[in-house]
């Protein structure tokens, strides 16, 4: 059986970077999760920690138009950590200057 454990849920104000250059100010909400795998063994049920991954959203405060047509970006969190991400989906015709959350797909871990 597979379960998921919440490791942390950072949220705050941050910056979106494209190759180290700030292109937007954002509010972010992230969840860092870890899979927990349960396996029945001869000595009982064992739990093993699986992969960690993140998911979340950003709400653009300034610089929304600069996010369009970008590949991998970085999010610098309030505490100074960074995580790379892709915009999960861009809706054609959507007004990205409107402060609504944009889903992001983080890649890798914090650095």
Image: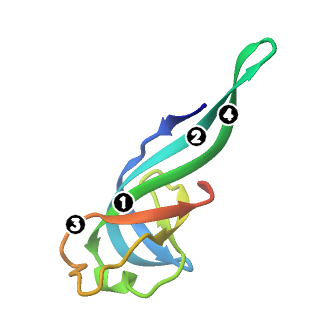
* Residue visible at 52% across and 42% down in the picture: 33
Residue 34's mark? 2
Q: Which residue is mark 1?
A: 57
* Residue visible at 57% across and 50% down in the picture: 53
Q: Check the image and report above or below for 99 versus 20.
A: above
Identify the image quadrant of the N terminus.
Answer: top right
Could you tell which of marks 3 and 4 lies nearer the N-terminus?
A: 4
* Cβ atoms under marks 3 and 4 closer than 8 Å: no
Q: Give the mark toward the camera: 2 or 3.
A: 2
For label 3, the crowd category at 10 Å Cα-Cα, with few meaning under 14, some 14 to 19 and many 20 or more, is few
72 to the left or right of 9: right
Could you tell which of marks 4 and 1 lies nearer the N-terminus?
A: 4
The one nearer the camera, 55 or 78, is: 55
Q: Check the image and report above or below for 48 versus 46.
A: below
Could you tell which of marks 2 and 3 lies nearer the N-terminus?
A: 2
Whole-Å distance between the Cαs marked 4 and 1? 25 Å
Q: Which residue is mark 4?
A: 49
Residue furthest to the top in view is 43
């Amino acid at each position: 059986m597979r379960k998921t454990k919440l490791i942390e849920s950072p949220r705050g104000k941050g910056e979106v970077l494209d190759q180290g250059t700030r292109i937007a100010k954002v509010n972010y909400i992230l969840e860092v999760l870890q899979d927990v795998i349960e396996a029945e063994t001869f000595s009982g049920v064992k739990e093993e920690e699986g992969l960690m991954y993140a998911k979340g959203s950003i709400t653009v405060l300034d610089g929304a138009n600069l996010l369009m047509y970008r590949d991998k970006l970085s999010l610098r969190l309030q505490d100074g950590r960074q995580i790379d991400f892709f915009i999960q989906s861009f809706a054609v015709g959507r007004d990205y200057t409107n402060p609504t959350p944009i889903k992001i797909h983080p890649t890798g871990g914090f650095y």
